C-alpha cells in the first residue's frame, strides 16, 4: 500500500467516524426500510456486511414485528434498527415490542413523532431517528430530543416529498450541528456518498441498490425489472385533479401506471356527473393501489403491481451479494478521495 493510499484510508476513517460512532458499525450506510423487502434476511445481511440494516415494520402487527426482530437477532450480532410508521393503529404496542426485544434504534417515519414518544424510547435506551423535510422540522425534532436525522429527497423510491436531496441538504445540513444527519434519495454510488460526507453528513441511507441483492426476497421478475430500468423510468405518481389527491410515490412505470391514470379520468367523470360523492370518489382512488406492492415484490406481477424504486435504479446492473454492494460503494468513495488528493 502506497503512502497516498494510507492517507486516503485515514481520511476516509475520519469522515465516517461520527456516523460509525452513532450507529456502532463499520460503515455509516443505512439500509433504507422497504416494505416486504427489509425483513430479517436482508437486514441481517446488511448489518453483517458492516453497514446498518433497518427492518421495515410497515403494516406488521406486534407479533409479526417481534418475529422479525427475533429472527434478525439470530442472524446477526451487529446493530440494526426498526422503522415504524407513525400512523400505525398499534404504534404504542410496536414501541413496547422494540423495548421488550432490546432493539437499540427506532426510525420514525410517515409523520412527526411526539416529544413523548421520543422520550419514551430514549428513557428505555433506544436511540431515535426522524425524517426532516425542512429546516423548520429538523430544528423542531432536534429540540424535542431526536438523536439523529435523515434528510430524504424526492429522488428516493416509494413515498416522497417534493424537494430534491441536493436542495434539502443545502437547506438543512449547514444549520444542524449537534446531532448526526444521514442523507437519502438518489444515492447509488460511493462518489455521491463521499460528497455528502465531505459536506458534513454523518452517513447515508440506501434502499434501491439492495433490492437486487442475493439476500433480498424480492421475486425474480421484480429484480429483473430493476436491472433493466433507467433512472427516467422511476417516476412520481401523477394527480389528475386536486379533488382526488394522490399520495406522491416514486415507482417504475408499468401497465398499472397507465391504468391508474385511466381510473382517475373515469372516477373524475363519475364525480362531475354526480354518480358518486366526493368521498366515494376519493376512496376509489385510494383503493386502486391496495395490495399492489406485495403483488409486485412477492408475487412477481410486475405489470399490475407497484414497482417502487428510486432514481438510482439505473445503477442496479446485476444481482450481487449485500457485501459486494457495500464494498463497491466504499471502494468508489475511497477512489473518489484518491482522485482528489492526486489533483491537488
Image: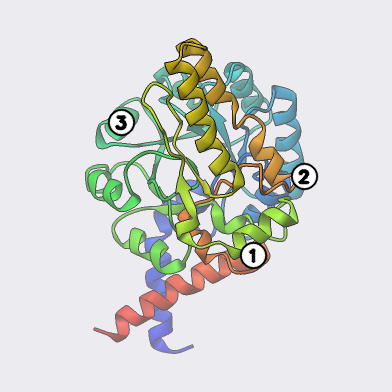
**Alpha carbon distance from label 2 to label 3:** 36 Å
Residue at the disc numbered 1:
323
Residue 125 visible in the snapshot: no
Q: Give the residue at x 67% y 57%.
A: 223
Q: Give the residue at x 35% y 81%.
A: 339
**Alpha carbon distance from label 1 to label 2:** 19 Å
Asked whether disc 2 touches disc 3, contact meaning CB atoms under 8 Å apart, the reply is: no
Residue 87 coordinates in the image, percent (x, y): 52, 21
Along the horizontal axis of the image, is 136 left or right of 2?
left
Asked whether disc 1 touches disc 2, contact meaning CB atoms under 8 Å apart, the reply is: no
Residue at the disc numbered 2:
74
Front residue of 152 and 62? 152
Front residue of 180 and 282? 282
Mark sitting earlier along the chain (3/1): 3
Residue 167 coordinates in the image, percent (x, y): 27, 49
Say if 20 sits above or below 172 in the image. below
Quadrant of residue 283 within the rendered picture: top right
Quadrant of residue 328 within the rendered picture: bottom right
Residue 111 coordinates in the image, percent (x, y): 43, 26
Q: Give the residue at x 61% y 64%.
A: 227
Say if 299 sits above or below 4 in the image. above
Neighbourhood count class around disc 3 (C-alpha, 10 Å): few under 14, some 14–19, many 20 upward: some
Residue at the disc numbered 3:
137
Q: Mark 1 against mark 2, which lies toward the viewer?
A: 1
Amino acid at each position: 500500500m502506497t503512502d497516498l493510499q494510507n492517507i486516503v484510508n485515514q481520511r476516509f476513517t475520519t469522515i465516517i467516524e461520527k456516523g460509525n460512532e452513532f450507529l456502532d458499525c463499520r460503515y455509516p450506510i443505512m439500509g433504507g426500510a422497504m416494505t416486504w423487502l427489509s425483513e430479517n434476511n436482508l437486514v441481517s445481511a446488511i448489518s453483517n456486511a458492516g453497514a446498518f440494516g433497518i427492518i421495515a415494520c410497515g403494516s406488521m402487527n406486534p407479533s409479526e414485528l417481534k418475529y422479525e426482530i427475533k429472527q434478525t437477532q439470530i442472524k446477526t450480532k451487529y446493530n440494526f434498527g426498526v422503522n415504524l410508521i407513525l400512523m400505525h393503529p398499534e404504534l404504542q404496542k410496536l414501541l413496547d415490542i422494540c423495548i421488550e426485544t432490546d432493539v437499540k434504534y427506532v426510525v420514525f417515519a410517515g409523520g412527526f413523532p411526539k416529544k413523548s414518544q421520543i422520550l419514551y424510547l430514549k428513557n428505555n435506551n433506544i436511540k431515535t431517528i426522524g425524517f426532516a423535510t425542512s429546516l423548520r422540522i429538523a430544528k423542531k425534532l432536534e429540540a424535542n430530543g431526536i438523536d439523529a436525522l435523515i434528510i430524504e429527497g424526492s429522488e428516493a423510491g416509494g413515498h416522497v416529498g417534493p424537494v430534491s436531496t441536493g436542495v434539502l441538504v443545502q437547506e438543512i445540513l449547514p444549520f444542524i450541528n449537534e446531532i448526526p444527519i444521514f442523507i437519502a434519495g438518489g444515492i447509488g454510488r460511493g462518489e455521491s456518498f463521499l460528497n455528502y460526507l465531505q459536506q458534513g453528513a454523518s452517513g447515508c441511507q440506501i434502499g434501491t441498490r439492495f433490492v437486487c441483492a442475493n439476500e433480498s426476497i424480492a421475486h425474480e421478475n421484480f429484480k429483473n425489472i430493476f436491472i433493466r430500468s433507467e433512472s427516467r423510468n422511476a417516476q412520481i405518481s401523477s394527480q389528475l385533479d386536486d379533488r382526488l389527491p394522490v399520495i406522491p410515490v416514486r415507482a417504475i412505470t408499468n401497465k398499472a401506471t397507465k391504468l391508474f391514470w385511466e381510473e382517475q379520468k373515469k372516477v373524475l367523470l363519475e364525480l362531475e356527473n354526480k354518480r358518486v360523492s366526493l368521498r366515494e370518489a376519493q376512496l376509489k382512488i385510494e383503493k386502486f393501489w391496495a395490495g399492489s406492492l406485495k403483488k409486485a415484490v412477492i408475487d412477481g406481477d410486475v405489470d399490475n403491481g407497484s414497482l417502487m424504486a428510486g432514481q438510482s435504479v439505473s445503477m442496479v446492473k446485476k444481482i450481487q451479494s449485500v457485501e459486494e454492494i457495500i464494498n463497491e460503494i466504499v471502494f468508489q468513495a475511497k477512489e473518489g478521495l484518491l482522485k482528489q488528493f492526486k489533483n491537488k
